[in-house]
Amino acid sequence: MNTVRFLFAAYVATWVIHLFYLGTLVRRFSRLRQQLRELGKGK
Amino acid sequence: MKRLFPILSIVTVVLLGYALYLALVVAPTDALQGEVYRIIYYHVPSAWTAFLLFSINFVASIRYLTRSNASTEKAAKWIAIGIGIAGLIAPFLPPVRRLIPAGMEPSAVATTIVLIPAFYFLVGKLFPGDRLDVLAVTSAEVGVVFCTIVLVTGPLWARPVWGIWWAPGDIRLTSTLVLWLIYVSYLVLRRFSNSAQTQMLAAALAVFGALDVPLVYLSIWFFRTQHPQPVIGGGGTMDPRMLHVLLFSWVAFLLFGFLVCWSRFRLEILKREVEQAYAMESLAGAGISEKASLPLSRSAR
């Protein structure tokens, strides 16, 4: 069995999970900043 | 402080890149497993980081639960001191020493137990008031991410080595899955509950959930399991070059985890500020002055 592909899959999966989570953080940050801007305009 | 984050980010990227180079190029190939064993350089550091984050969540939750009542807070403080003193002495007493599994050093047990009160007081000092709750949700969420990686990389290692993706009934694997499910439930509770008691309920759930962390960690000592024996403190015979790479990789992932937690912490603070601003706007719309609503704004912080 070619085990290198499992090694490759594990390393790729790790970074896909981390990058996906970092992406959700960036999206949530930008949404909150947008809400803050809207609140500032309303005043 | 603003400069520290980008500097640490650059350092982390360099460390993670070097850790990858060490893991794939420098670390020797395992005589039995071949190249696939190199998964441990991501799997084990992710597991250690997840355990650490769940432990932070546990301490923050305990402090959050006890802070509402002065006498409970005092009792918790003395219990923490008691655990520290007992942990310092007990592992060296012959009856207790006999209970410690072979390969586990009493000094390592003592150090781990003494870290609990040290952690308890440090967290209380660094994260006063509602920031304890912010720390709790931050550490749980990032801990779940690292635990997910453990549960994904584990089967990817097991398939070529064991011939199966998952060993049903194996206590190490099952307890890790249960740990992940408990913290996912914790996050779901926090996300979808609108009750004023959500933070308290989540903190109580976290305290029970954290009890699974020592079970996961110690399961390979106390139960027959298919999972490999611990690489540190278990009397294992890991090649020092492999151990060096593993520890370096952990430092890199620990720093990465710290930066992710830092970002998540700031996000939670910003989220609460936005919620507070909306609440103030609603109060202003209802004709209640900002001055009259001060106690609310204080409690929301």
Image (spheres, coloured by chain):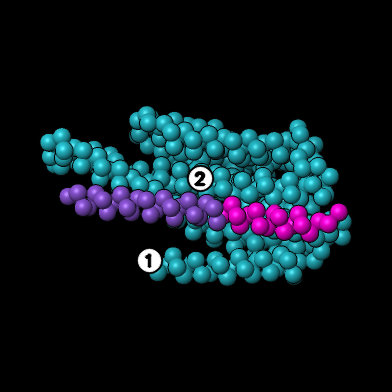
Chain colours: A purple, B cyan
Depth check: B276 or B233 in front?
B276
Is residue B104 at least partly visible in the picture? no
- How far apart are the alpha carbons under marks 2 and 1? 24 Å
Q: Secondary structure at mark 2?
A: helix
**Amino acid type, callout 2:** Glu
- Where residue B142 sits in the image (x, y, percent)? 52, 49
Residue under label 1, please give it: B2
The label number, if any, that marks residue B141 in the structure image: 2
Depth check: B145 or A43 in front?
A43
Depth check: B161 or B248 in front?
B161
- Where residue A33 sits in the image (x, y, percent)? 33, 54
A28 to B79, vertically: above or below = below
Left or right of A16? Residue A40 is left
B109 to B253, vertically: above or below = above
Q: Of callouts 2 and 1, which one flags the residue occurring earlier in the amino acid sequence?
A: 1
Decide: few, some or many residues near mark 1? Use Cα within 10 Å; few <14, some 14-19, many ≥20: few
Q: Which residues are magenta?
A: A1-18
Q: Quadrant of the C terminus of chain B?
A: top left
Identify the residue at image location x=30%, y=49%. Answer: A35
| Chain name for mark 1 | B
* Residue B94 on the magenta span: no
**Amino acid type, callout 1:** Lys
B56 to B250, vertically: above or below = above
Is residue B6 at least partly visible in the picture? yes
Q: Quadrant of the N terminus of chain B?
A: bottom left
Residues flagged by tags 2 and 1 on a common chain: yes
Left or right of B280? Residue B35 is right
Identify the residue at image location x=59%, y=35%. Answer: B181
- Where residue B210 sits in the image (x, y, percent)? 56, 37
| Chain name for mark 2 | B
Decide: few, some or many residues near mark 2? Use Cα within 10 Å; few <14, some 14-19, many ≥20: many
A7 to B162, vertically: above or below = below
